[in-house]
Image (cartoon, rainbow, N blue to C red):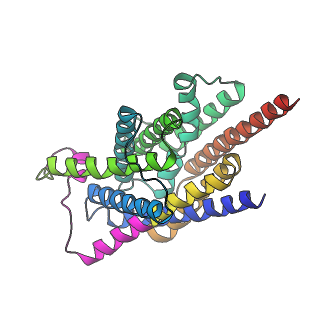
Amino acid sequence: MESERLGILLILFGMSLFCIQDIFIKLIINDTSILQILVFRAFLGFIFLTGYLYINKKKITYTSNYPIIAIIRGTLFFVGFIFFYISLTKIPLAEANALFFTNPIIVTFLSVFLLKNPIGIHRILAIIICCIGTLLIIKPSIYNFNWYILLPIFTAFSYAISMVLSKITSDKDNSFQQSFHIYLGGVIFGSLLSIVLTNQAASSLSLLSIISTKWIFTDLNIIYKLIIIAVVGTAGIFCLVSAYRIGSPSANAPFEYILLIYALISGYIIFNEIPDIYSLIGMALIIMSGIYVFIRESFNKRLIATIKSR
């Protein structure tokens, strides 16, 4: 019980760190390169994780027993979160996070096809509720539709695929190896894409122009914010990893939704963002569907354990 409480506290603290990270990214995203943010954060995360393993005398392994899958995961994470941070330039912080939190439902859906997991009426109901919540937030319309609001859903989809792939490779690649692959993907792909897009800022494609912003190394106001982003983002990941190592996933996972509360409060105070009533209802439905899936998973596992013990 104590380990579960500590795990929940780490989740709550980790989510607060992610909120701080998102706030600083939103503050500087129009003044610096998204690629610079991602590369800097991934590089520092790589250094921190290496140092952590070295200090604790744990084996440091950068390679993978599934190199193709590792490359795919790294690519999905990198591309997915590029789109998420681009969305922060055009939509409120809380709405972006709410749409990203559709990922547990997407994982449930993908598990049916990739992991051959069965799906029952309860999960189908959760998927339907999540879809309704998503539609209330994006408000599809042929007139004045904000296409940027679809980007966090793409991020959730790429993240969900990555999580399913992590499950597939977990028999031979441990969590530290999998983290290294994500960090390496961010550093390598971010640096290469930045080189390719050099001098492309004048492109007529809005997304491309946002990505191809030049890197900044002389503005101390930007540099110290990049350091904060990298430090709190990496610390947030360590909190989550630690929480799931010492606590129960079924107990921890629902508390990740506290990030939506943090995002609503910070979005209102710092950016004067006030979601409309439809978006708030949509957020509530997404939270309900996600928590329902977690609770249902926990119930099924306890039921299976009880049956096996008889």
Determine the image quadrant of residue 127: top right
Give whichever of 240, 222 is nearer the camera: 240
Give whichever of 171, 294 is nearer the camera: 171
The quadrant the C terminus occupies is top right
Q: Residue furthest right?
A: 310
Residue 19 visible to an observer of this rendering: no
The quadrant the N terminus occupies is bottom right
Residue 9 within the magenta-colored segment of the rendering: no
Residue 229 within the magenta-colored segment of the rendering: yes
Identify the magenta region: 203-231
Q: Where 75 sits versus 223, above or below?
A: above
Residue 199, given in percent of the width and then of the height, sits at: 10, 53
Determine the image quadrant of residue 282: top right
231 horizontally vs 310: left or right: left
Residue at image position (38%, 40%) is 76
Please tell me how many numbered marks the rendered image carries.
0
Q: Where 246 sits versus 74, above or below?
A: below
Residue at image position (58%, 36%) is 105
Residue 148 visible to an observer of this rendering: yes
226 horizontally vs 161: left or right: left
Q: Residue furthest bottom?
A: 220
Residue at image position (63%, 35%) is 129
Q: Where 161 sits versus 96, above or below?
A: above
Residue 167, given in percent of the width and then of the height, sits at: 53, 36
Residue 298, given in percent of the width and then of the height, sits at: 73, 40
Q: Main secondary structure of the magenta part?
A: helix
Residue at image position (54%, 53%) is 276
